[in-house]
Amino acid sequence: MNGSFVIDLTDLQPRTATTDAPMRPVDMPAGRAGVQVGDYWMQPKYDGWYVVFKAGRAYTRHGRDITDWACWDGRALPWNAVGELMHTEGRHRIQSLRNSPEGLRVVLFDLPGAAPIEQRLAGLPRVADLHGFESAPAWTCETWEQADRLRVRMQQEGHEGLVLKRAGSAWTSGDCGDWVRFKA
């Protein structure tokens, strides 16, 4: 993985069913068994609400439609993206976004589809910019020591840790070994 991408957005078509389970990372196996650090992209594990954007609507991880919340303030929402809904004052204030856009922060971290993760990550900045959101950064590490330093840095910045995403992997609904939580 050299960090450069050729982007082909033809595989980034929206999923049509709103009942698809979100992709969920699994916990890091004991002793990091079977996880080769160089085989993964890494993104911050944010401390907010997982939000799914489908067909211009917003849903929580549990499928609750929150499109009518005041925080969206008439903005066009992504057709097909997932991210983290956060409040600038912390997780405890997310519910206040129901009544006001004040404090809204959304970071997109993936574009569900059949394309490999590299293509999906390459498309994130364009989709995020189009909707006034942020796109999650992504890194690779060659050693566990580098990954440990990155995880500690993310935690110092107020994130839960990292989510590791297997290089070349397609989007899969539900629990998926291609995404691994790396928090401790």
Image: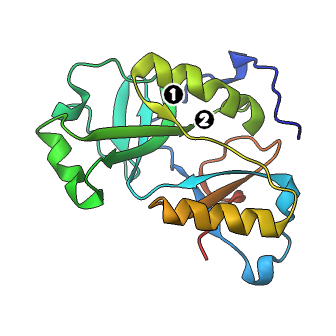
Disc 2 to disc 1: CB gap under 8 Å: yes
- Please determine whether, in this image, residue 9 is positioned above or below residue 65: above
Instruction: Answer with mark 2 or mark 1, whichever residue precedes in sequence.
Output: 1
- Please determine whether, in this image, residue 102 is positioned above or below residue 42: above
The residue depicted at 78 percent of the width and 63 percent of the height is 146
Q: Using residue 42 as the reference point, say whether residue 66 is left or right of it.
A: left
Q: Position of residue 58 (x, y in %)?
A: 35, 34
Question: Image quarter for residue 36?
Answer: bottom right
The residue depicted at 81 percent of the width and 26 percent of the height is 5
SS class of the residue under badge 2? loop
Residue behind mark 2: 112
Question: Image quarter for residue 69?
Answer: top left
Assess disc 1: are there few (<14), some (14-19) or many (≥20) residues with their C-alpha within 10 Å of its C-alpha.
many
Spatial CA distance of label 2 from label 1 is 7 Å
Q: Nearer the viewer, residue 146 or 17?
A: 146
- Please determine whether, in this image, residue 113 is positioned above or below residue 44: above
SS class of the residue under badge 1? strand
Q: Position of residue 127 (x, y in %)?
A: 53, 22
Which amino acid, mark 2? Pro
The residue depicted at 82 percent of the width and 35 percent of the height is 3
Q: Nearer the viewer, residue 116 or 162?
A: 162
Q: Quadrant of the C terminus?
A: bottom right
Q: Residue furthest left?
A: 99
Residue behind mark 1: 80
Q: Using residue 161 as the reference point, say whether residue 36 is left or right of it.
A: right
Assess disc 2: are there few (<14), some (14-19) or many (≥20) residues with their C-alpha within 10 Å of its C-alpha.
many
Q: Is residue 160 visible?
A: no
Which amino acid, mark 1? Asn
